[in-house]
Image (cartoon, coloured by chain):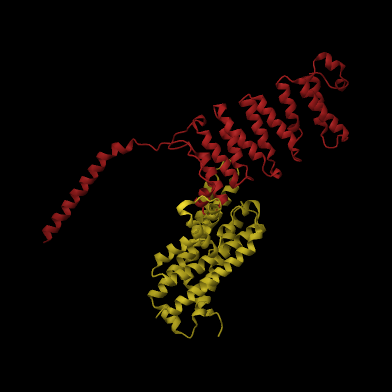
Amino acid sequence: MQNNTQKRRLSLYWFMCLLVILQLLLWPHVRSVETRWLNIPDAPSEEFLMLSFLGDREMAYRTMGMTLQNMGDLDGHVTPIKDYDFEHLQNWFFLLDRFNSTSNFIPYLASFYFGATQNPAQLDYVIPYLRQAAQADAGFEKWRWLVQAMFLARHRQHDMEKALKLADELAARNDPDAPIWTKQMRAFIKADMGEKEAAYDIIIGMLKEAAEAHNKNVDPAEIFFMKDYICNRLLDAPQRAAHPLCQDVPQE
Amino acid sequence: MAILSLPLVGYVCKAAARDKIFYGFVLLLICLVSFSTFMGSGAVVEKGQFVTIYMAYSLRLLAVMALCLFIAFLVRRLHDNKDLEFLLARPILSLQFILSFLLSFGVLSLLLSFLVFVAFLLTPVVAANSALLIWAGTLFFELLIVGAAAFFFALVLPSAVLTIMATLGFYLLCRMLGALLMIIQKHVVGGKWGFLNNIMEGVSILIPRFDLVADSGWLLYGVQNIEYMPWFLAHGCLFMVILVVASYLDLTQKQF
């Protein structure tokens, strides 16, 4: 009886050894398989995301925001941003904006992280989102995202028409907390486009506006900067010499 | 005869102390706060906001789980040890028994939500303001309803596992009800499945909407949609009364 039990135990040990050997045979086939990144999945519906986080919209926003931040960096591999699916990414931006338009996390990721893509054409997916992010409550300095969109259009895409459209939008906002350069941007872009007269009109208009308000709302340094910009950047030498505004402005 | 039995309240509170629910809760609370801090610190900006939201979400779930598990196993133990028969053999009314138990669960809910409140006060991520107080207050109310539901399920269902599953299912439904109603409003489900909309509408008449209270976003941006609060509180109170009546009916029909 005891002999039989011992035999059974021994055969079980052998069986276990056999299983371990089988594991060893299977191992080379599994070892080389790596977790593959299949690019950014498309954004789900608002309801689906809400259900996934038990109706907690803020948790959904934060968790999916963090997921977007870390996407592509998987299993020791780092994916270049140009390889991301920006169409899907844009859907995520707009979806998460519906969950929280007050936070600056997703606009920050969109402009400073995904905005650094090696392929400037992909910024066409980022800029419309930044425009929308800027429309949120003005109390949170959202105009900055419009500036960022303008920067991407002007300096990364070299699309001056688009940058000018965004600059017009920025100037029209009249945010009380926005600095005066947000209104000067139109002139800078016009000057870059070679339309110096138009740029001159904008800056001189701003100077007149400031003078009518007895320079109350404008810093003296800003007044000086605008005069300097007109005299040293927009006007040529003969125009400068004849312009009364430039008499007390040192030449560059 | 008084409507409450204070010895019974003391009995449940002692059972909670015997089960070391508070030690376990505090230990897990520390773990979750640490985990939330670790996770939130990974964000490129708004780290404090991330930590706050992870804390709010995880601590709320922890409190619900702790209360649900305690009630399920307490009532099962009462059944198995014949304590329930003993308690009901005393000159005590079924209603008195139910209300005393609910009061004790209320005390536990208050303690749990207070511990969560203190956890937020001790971490530097959230300012001690009225939003935090309202958030913790509504968490307490949420726990009160979950406690009443868990007690009802524990009385009605024959095992602790079933009680826990039913209570967590109920909690998930309460939390997801807002999203489900949104689906109904957008007519996503139609055709031959359209009748499901009516069923969900029917469910929403009874079930309180937890997505309207203890909103994690309040901790960051202040309390919003406060105008719904009195309606939610009234709805929740009515639902608890329904649970009390249902528990009473079940208890009086049982043959001990």
Q: Quadrant of residue A107?
A: top right
Whether residue B19 is visible to the viewer of this picture, yes or no, is no
Q: Position of residue B94 (x, y in %)?
A: 49, 80
Left or right of residue A143: residue B27? left
Quadrant of the image containing the N terminus of chain B: bottom right
A109, A203: nearer the viewer: A203
Residue B112 sits above or below residue B2 on the image? above
Please name the residue shown 55% across and 67% down the image: B144
Above or below, B57 relative to B112: above
Question: Could you tell me which quadrant the C terminus of chain B lies in?
Answer: bottom left
Residue A28: give x, y in percent of width and height. 29, 36
Q: What's the residue at 46%, 35% (across, down)?
A: A39
Seen in the picture, residue A69 relative to B58 is either above or below; the reply is above
Answer yes or no: is residue B145 visible: yes
Q: Look at 57% across and 69% down and name the residue there.
A: B238
Task: Describe residue B153's horizontal placement relative to residue B53 as left or right.
Answer: left
Q: How many marks?
A: 0
Q: Quadrant of residue A55?
A: bottom right
Give how far across and how far down residue B228 sits, in percent: 64, 60
Q: Which chain is displayed in red in the rendered image?
A: A
The residue furthest top is: A238
Residue located at (40% from left, 65% from top): B162
From the viewer's perspective, is B77 left or right of B189?
A: left
Q: Which shade is chain B?
A: yellow
- Residue, far front: B191
Observer-nearest residue: A3 or A95?
A: A95
Q: Where residue B181 sits in the image (x, y, percent)?
A: 54, 55
